[in-house]
Image: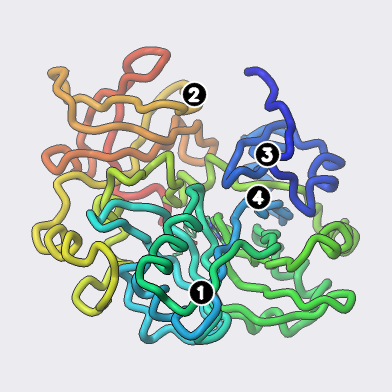
Amino acid sequence: MALISPSRRLRRTPFSDGVEAAGVKGYTVYNHMLLPTVFRSVGEDYRHLKTAVQVWDVACERQVELRGPDAARLMQMLTPRDLRGMLAGQCFYVPMVDETGGMLNDPVAVKLAEDRWWISIADSDLLLWVKGIAYGYRLDVLIDEPDVSPLAVQGPKAEELMVRVFGEAIRAVRFFRFGWFGFQGHDLLIARSGYSKQGGFEIYVIGSEVGMPLWDALFAAGADLDVRAGCPNLIERIEGGLLSYGNDMTRENTPHECGLGRFCNVETAIGCIGRDALLRVSMEGPVRQIRAIEIPGDPVPPCDRIWPLTDGRGRRVGRVTSAAASPDFGGNVAIGMVRMTHWDEGTRLVVETPVGEREAVVRERFWL
Ligand code: THG
């Protein structure tokens, strides 16, 4: 494939110098920003992520900040997940939908205070939707994209590395909670979260000044832990069932189709946009849903377009939207959307890949 031409529109991050020095081999574009996709090879990065600790430049997980008296009200308008029980210091994975119930984003909501929230967005221009809603409803809230850049520390040795840099207190941070930690005179918000199933933390770095000093400190402290630069890993995230907005779901899908019904409380999320549409789909249930798909045999190429799923007789029953060869499961792991008639565990289907037809088997999940 050709190179990506750099320009100001394709934003660098506070950690880009470190990423380049570490020998990044591939990038994608996410929220108009560089996101590394591979350092050594996707397979080598995968094995290392599952055994050691990696530092990820995920600055592309941009924050949409809501600040002001109407911040909490606006936040509840944006998601069908009930936020009434959410405390400052918590993070919630929240589907966001339009008035038809179509997925607009699947961010992590970070509650800093009753009147101050961050929406840590996936790859869509959510800021424009949020500003439009606030303006249309004349809400008393300021909305912008602050200069905040998440740096993730992921892997089984992540906690050990974090303790060395931030102290023992980091151990007390629970899953999807955060605390404030000092580093060279800067306050950093650190949550136990991240886009892998290997455990770890996300450091929300405010401003760009402390980016490289923090990057360097993590590598200096973790030399004997074999800390390496890494990135969200395609194989590991498919195995873990972590969805990718724009790949596995779009505005065409409801949260229920995406298997995100457990993050929707349509009865109690009063005031949420799309509530009427979602009340219908949550009553009737979806007629297609995201499934883990196994594609036995040789490695398939990257899934950069829809791969149709058919039954044995050539009739269309769904699609595959992400796929990768998995060293630990053998064959290929994939994510797809499958019609109700064919979504049961063990159903054998055919997937049309760019390299020809392959067997596909519906799975409950890849992870345990
Ligand atoms: N961290 C932060 N921002 C993000 C992501 C992240 N923004 C973009 C993207 N990732 C948003 N998508 C997801 C998808 C899955 C999860 C988080 C963000 C996730 N899911 C867990 C799971 O499914 O096992 C836990 C969900 C839960 O139980 O609440 O972590 O990664 N800052």
Which of label 1 and label 2 is nearer to you? Answer: 1
Closer mark to the observer between disc 3 and disc 2: 3
Q: Measuring from the top left, give residue 186's x and y in whole percent.
A: 82, 76
Q: Which comes before the other along the chain, label 1 or label 2?
A: 1
313 or 51: nearer the viewer:
313
Observer-side mark, 3 or 1, equals 3
Q: Mark 3, mark 4: which one is toward the viewer?
A: 3
Residue type (three-letter) at the residue carrying disc 1:
Cys
Q: Which of the two discs, 1 and 4, sits closer to the camera? A: 1
CA–CA distance in space, label 3 to label 1: 28 Å
Q: Mark 2 points at which residue?
A: 299
- For badge 4, the amino acid type reads Leu
Residue annotated with mark 3: 10
Label 1 residue near ligand 1, CB within 8 Å: yes
User: Quick one: 273 or 311, which is closer to the camera?
Assistant: 273
Element class at badge 2? loop
Q: Compare marks 1 and 4 and give the one earlier in the sequence.
A: 4
Q: What residue type is labelled 2?
A: Pro
Q: Mark 4 points at which residue?
A: 49
Q: Is residue 311 left or right of residue 179?
A: left
Query: Gap in Å between the C-alphas at discs 4 and 2?
Result: 20 Å
